[in-house]
């Protein structure tokens, strides 16, 4: 059952604006409402720790009181910053002509997402968060945790927003990629856009049959999909296709045939999210 709502996660990083624009773009194509969340860490919004047990230290009590006051000030600032981030996000989405709601929450981001994911059809999140400038070669830890934990499609926004006009589906015949094909065929998100099914590796009769079946599924949904088979490593092949053929979006499964589902995102998926300059729609 669909909810007609997107869940967008913003943290005030450079990726947050892109998240808002992509959420609005998705909403306009699907008729959805955008619900934007900013989640404060467990300590950010806490007024103070309970230090009463240490008050009997006498000479140190005034220091403890000052620390308590500082904690309260930090909590108020964190709340104010969170509200400001949400108001900026609201303005961006509303400027794109989309209905939007905002929510400020406190706690663990993934726990918040899991508690609310049934109220949304898709999660939109930035590739990296506030620490992106300090870890350019690493995925945001929250992104990895959300992808591992959520059962909804996850749209991973890149730094710069660009309307999607051409789509590449990374296909390996696995359950996740089959689910991605079925999702696109039934969903109006990418309706009318040119799509390509790309397989990286040696062509076999089984792979060709699987690709033709996926093409037929997409055709039933109104897509005239092209097929590309390239005998190369998936990460290099897909990255090259995106660069040379100017695709604006990659759709792929979060896990491939050799996945260790409970430990890591599939290795190809991780590499694509890390290196590609276009957004990626991940299917579980």
Image: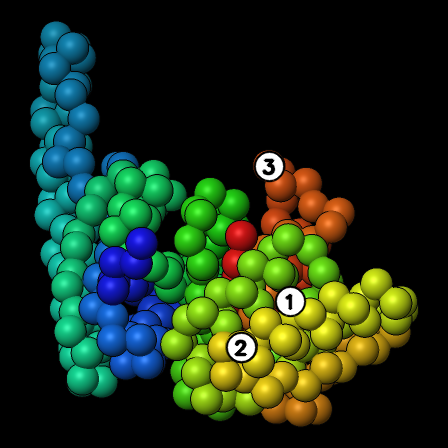
Q: Badge 3: few (under 14), some or many (20 or more) residues near its Cα, within 10 Å?
A: few
Residue 12 position, x and y percent, is 30, 64
Tell me the colour scheme of the image. rainbow
Q: Residue at x 73, y 50 (%)?
A: 257
Q: Residue at x 53, y 65 (%)?
A: 182
Q: Of 233 and 226, which appears nearest the observer? A: 226
Q: Residue at x 18, y 26 (%)?
A: 49
Q: Quadrant of residue 27?
A: bottom left
* Of the two numbered discs 1 and 3 in the rendering, the one whose residue sits closer to the viewer: 3
The residue under label 3 is 262
Q: Quadrant of residue 33?
A: bottom left
Q: Badge 2: few (under 14), some or many (20 or more) residues near its Cα, within 10 Å?
A: few
The residue under label 1 is 272
Q: Is residue 51 left or right of residue 219?
A: left
Work out which quarter of the rendered image holds the N terminus and state it. bottom left
User: Residue at the top extreme?
Assistant: 56
* The label number, if any, that marks residue 220 in the structure image: 2
Label 3: state its secondary structure. Answer: loop
Q: Please determine whether, in this image, residue 54 is positioned above or below residue 196.
A: above
Observer able to see residue 222 = yes
Residue 270 position, x and y percent, is 63, 58
């Amino acid at each position: 059952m669909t909810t007609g709502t997107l869940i967008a996660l913003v943290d005030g990083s450079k990726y947050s604006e892109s998240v808002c624009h992509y959420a609005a773009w998705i909403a306009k194509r699907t008729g959805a409402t955008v619900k934007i969340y900013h989640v404060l860490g467990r300590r950010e919004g806490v007024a103070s720790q309970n230090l009463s047990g240490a008050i009997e230290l006498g000479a140190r009590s005034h220091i403890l009181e000052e620390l308590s006051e500082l904690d309260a000030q930090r909590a108020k600032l964190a709340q104010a910053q969170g509200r400001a981030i949400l108001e900026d996000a609201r303005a961006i989405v509303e400027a794109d002509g989309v209905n939007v709601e905002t929510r400020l929450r406190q706690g663990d981001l993934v726990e918040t997402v899991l508690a609310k994911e049934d109220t949304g059809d898709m999660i939109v999140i930035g590739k990296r968060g506030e620490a992106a400038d300090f870890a350019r070669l690493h995925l945001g830890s929250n992104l990895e945790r959300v992808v591992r934990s959520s059962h909804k499609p996850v749209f991973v926004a890149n730094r710069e927003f660009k309307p999607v006009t051409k789509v590449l589906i990374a296909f390996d015949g696995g359950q996740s990629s089959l689910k991605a094909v079925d999702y696109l065929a039934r969903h109006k998100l990418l309706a009318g856009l040119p799509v390509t099914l790309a397989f990286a590796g040696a062509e076999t009769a089984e792979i060709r049959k699987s690709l033709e079946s996926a093409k037929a599924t997409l055709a039933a949904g109104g897509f005239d999909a092209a097929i590309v088979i390239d005998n190369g490593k998936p990460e290099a092949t897909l990255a090259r296709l995106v660069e040379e053929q100017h695709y604006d979006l990659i759709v792929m499964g979060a896990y491939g045939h050799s996945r260790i589902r409970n430990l890591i995102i599939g290795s190809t998926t991780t590499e694509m999210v890390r290196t590609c300059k276009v957004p990626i729609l991940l299917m579980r």
